[in-house]
Amino acid sequence: MKTAFVLNGPNLNLLGSREPTVYGHQTLADVQALCERACAANGLKLEFRQSNHEGELVDWIHEAGRQQAAGKAAGVILNAGAYTHTSIALHDAVKGAGVTLIELHISNVHAREAFRHHSYLSPVAQAVMAGFGVNGYALAVAGLAQMDAPA
Ligand code: DQA
């Protein structure tokens, strides 16, 4: 069974209490449980992590790339938070690791402030998920499983 890496960036540890009108009331632990269910339903094993530190996210993307190259991982679902809009390092990490990436946002970033409209990740992502609330994580897990399925 292959692993789906679900990686969360800065401030996502605050889910549930952080701007609930934008991000909803579910906590990161709730999101992890939702991802567990989605992975079980799609034949994937879950590796779920959160960090407020850019370099740690870079290291985890490299790790996922190595596992994918070894046939052990399906890819990465990444909610990079604000690093989406700032991080060339994460862009380069995805490219360098050769990992399958689904970029994810809980909110519809394109309906928000202009500084959220640009993403350094979209050009290196296979797909982008935004605006479905936390249920987007389950949809992204199903999408990653389908991308990995033999044609
Ligand atoms: C976010 C959107 C980003 O613009 C923001 O900085 C986040 C969360 C989302 O899930 O909607 O931290 O990625």
Image (tube, rainbow, N blue to C red):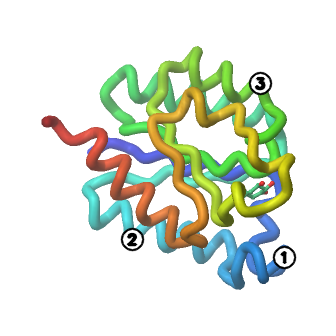
Residue identifier under label 3? 88
User: Would you say 117 lies left or right of 71 here?
Assistant: right
Residue at 32%, 52% in the rendered image: 44
| Residue type, numbered disc 2 | Arg
Task: Give the numbered dot on residue 19.
Answer: 1
Residue at 79%, 50% in the rendered image: 116
Question: How many marks on residues?
Answer: 3
Up-down: is 82 above or below 23? above
**The one of 129 and 74 positioned closer to us in this rendering:** 129
- Confirm or reject: label 3 Cβ below 8 Å from ligand 1: no
Choose top left, top right, bottom left or bottom right for residue 147: top left
Residue identifier under label 2? 37
Question: Residue 96 location in percent, x, y?
Answer: 58, 15
Task: Give the quarter of the figure containing the C terminus.
Answer: top left
Number of residues whose C-alpha sits closer than 10 Å to that of mark 2, classed few (under 14), some (14–19) or many (20 or more): some
Which comes sooner in the sequence, label 2 or label 3?
Answer: 2
Residue at 65%, 22% in the rendered image: 93
Pointer 1 and pointer 2: residues touching (CB < 8 Å)?
Answer: no
